Image: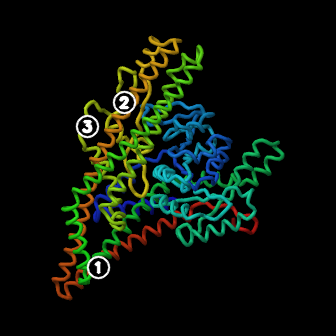
Amino acid sequence: MTDLTAALDTAVRDTCAYVRTLDPDAGADLADLRRRQLTRPSVVLVGETKRGKSSLLNALLGVPGLSPVDAAVATSTYLHFRPGAAAAVAWVPGAPEPVDVPLADLAGWATGPGRARRIEVTHPAPLLQYVSLLDTPGVGGLDPAHTAVALDAVDRATALLFVADASAPLSQPELTFLEAASARIDTVVFALTKVDAFGGWRRIAEDNRALLRAHAPRFADAGWFPVSARLAELALTVAPAESAALVDASRIADLQHALVDLAGRGHQLQLANVLRAARGDLQRLEAAAAARMAATEADPADVARVRAERAGLAARKRTESRQWTLLLGSEIQRARVEVVGLLRTRVAAVQSDFTARIDAARGAALAALPQAVDTELQAVAVGLSHDLEVTFRQVGEKVLAEVFGPDELAGVLGRLNATLRHALAAAPQRESSADNVLIAVSAGGIAFLAGRGAMLGASVLGAGGIAAGGLLVPVAGVGLGLAAGGYVLYRRRVQTDRQQARAWLRDVLAEARAALADEISYRFTDLQYALSVAVDDAVERRLKQLDAHIADLDAAAAEDAAGRARRRAEAQADRDAVRARMRQVDDVLARVRAQTPVAAPEGRENP
């Protein structure tokens, strides 16, 4: 193990230095990845919906029902399990601090209308002493936001536990997600759930291996752990004499031991992840060197094609930039009207509901009205945050599709996210905005999170954002709830008077709707500014790339055969050097994967 760690250290250091000399930006990204501190290895459970991820996690921890089962309806929640006393806290969009959550209410917080973005659960389960576990929403299925949240969680992983079930072989969405998730995660362990319910699970396991050989060759020899969470849970409810047989049949212990083994190699796995990310940069550098080789041929057709592409893009920039601006403005206006309409509908529904409650309320129920209204307003704000994310993504992708063709768009999206973040950060802050500041609306006692700082807090673990089709739109949750003044005003005006309660409710909801409508307007203004900057930057980058390629072609055309041969030899030497570096990386990563635990054979059969 010491030799492998030393080999990983050397490979990471040398490869990062090599990438940095050819692409400083990519080298800086790898350096940031390398500097991440590993306190406890994290294994992220990923897979299609309804594959039994949550049930498997509960079986691994030996705590039935801890992670909510059937949480497929959650669109933006994942749960992080770590060691400690049994407790949970939730991060709700717009809330300045995490909220304490009773363990019995996890399902409601993960899937209900006031769902959290992230829930952290501490528990004294033995496995958590070695490794943290993250339970993610299912990928594929009907909601692409699941995939976005799962991939965000993967970014924090030391290793992946990919969960499939024994009902059918891996689907195309599962294979596609595996490819995306493993781009920067080298170690993946596979679990096949529900083997007690499907007698043909061995055939399914073989089919899955064949699919991996065809679509993800690096996992062709990966072991599959056949498990039954149901049998493991049943073992906890029967007499000890019967329990042992059920535990053995569940084979959960094999997977637990595998995760403990991975945890003991956490530092190695982290280095392997850096090396896996670096390999992606090497592939890109190899393609660039191959393009330079092709340019030395000075093919007239290639020259004409590149020049035409460059001239076309420059002409479109001159003649259509006004059209792009108008399209962006019209799409922003249309989307703003739609979102404000949704807000009006939701607030009207809240008013109708609470008016009926007031009419039926007595005593303590009427006195508790402010708390109930506060909770409902938070739910409205959470739903609005999700609507904004989806709408922003749709607007951005529609505008970009007008600027770039499908092939160009694939390359543009690779660098667009950083441009969006930079544009939002550089935009002038609006008056009275500040990071994580509660701004009270005096008349109704409403408070909400405002300010660009709230938009830019980082990712689902800190800043909001939704990725789909390659576009990430940084959006943090809009927070909304009663400020202290709202409670004081209620006690002074209402007490037990229903007529006053109805008047108070109208005032509060009118202020809430006005506050959120203003916030919606600000958010769309931010988006319009950011996308305008991003489109200009993307066009300029593409023009520079084409100019560089044209320069290579012109230089090759101006030289004689010997000069072109020299240029080709230089480009080929660069490509061969990259390929040699990739082979070294692959050798080290293969040694790491050889240490990945596999399930014990069942008799003569290898499950």
Q: Which secondary structure, mark 1?
A: helix
The crowding category of the residue bearing disc 3, from other C-alpha atoms within 10 Å (few below 14, some 14 to 19, many at least 20), is some
Measured Cα–Cα span from mark 3 to mark 1 = 47 Å
Measured Cα–Cα span from mark 2 to mark 3 = 21 Å
| 225 displayed left or right of 415 | right
Instruction: Please say which color scheme the image uses.
Output: rainbow
| Residue matched to label 3 | 429
- Closer to the chain start, of discs 2 and 3, is 3
| Residue matched to label 1 | 293
The residue at the point 47 percent across, 39 percent down is 383
| 389 displayed left or right of 289 | right
Question: What amino acid type should be assigned to the residue bearing mark 3?
Answer: Gln
- Residue 11 visible, this orientation: yes
Please say if 557 is above or below 147.
Answer: below
Q: Which secondary structure, mark 3?
A: loop
Please say if 554 is above or below 537.
Answer: below
- Between label 3 and label 1, give the one nearer the viewer: 3
Residue 208 or residue 389, whichever sits in front? 389
The residue at the point 66 percent across, 61 percent down is 599
Q: Which mark is residue 568?
A: none
Measured Cα–Cα span from mark 1 to mark 2 = 60 Å
Query: Hey, which quadrant is residue 23 in on the image?
Result: bottom left
Residue most extreme to the left = 558
- Residue 18 visible, this orientation: no
Quarter of the image with the C terminus in it: bottom right
- Between label 2 and label 3, give the one nearer the viewer: 2
- Closer to the chain start, of discs 3 and 1, is 1
Question: What amino acid type should be assigned to the residue bearing mark 2?
Answer: Ala
The crowding category of the residue bearing disc 2, from other C-alpha atoms within 10 Å (few below 14, some 14 to 19, many at least 20), is some
| Residue matched to label 2 | 514
Q: Which secondary structure, mark 2?
A: helix
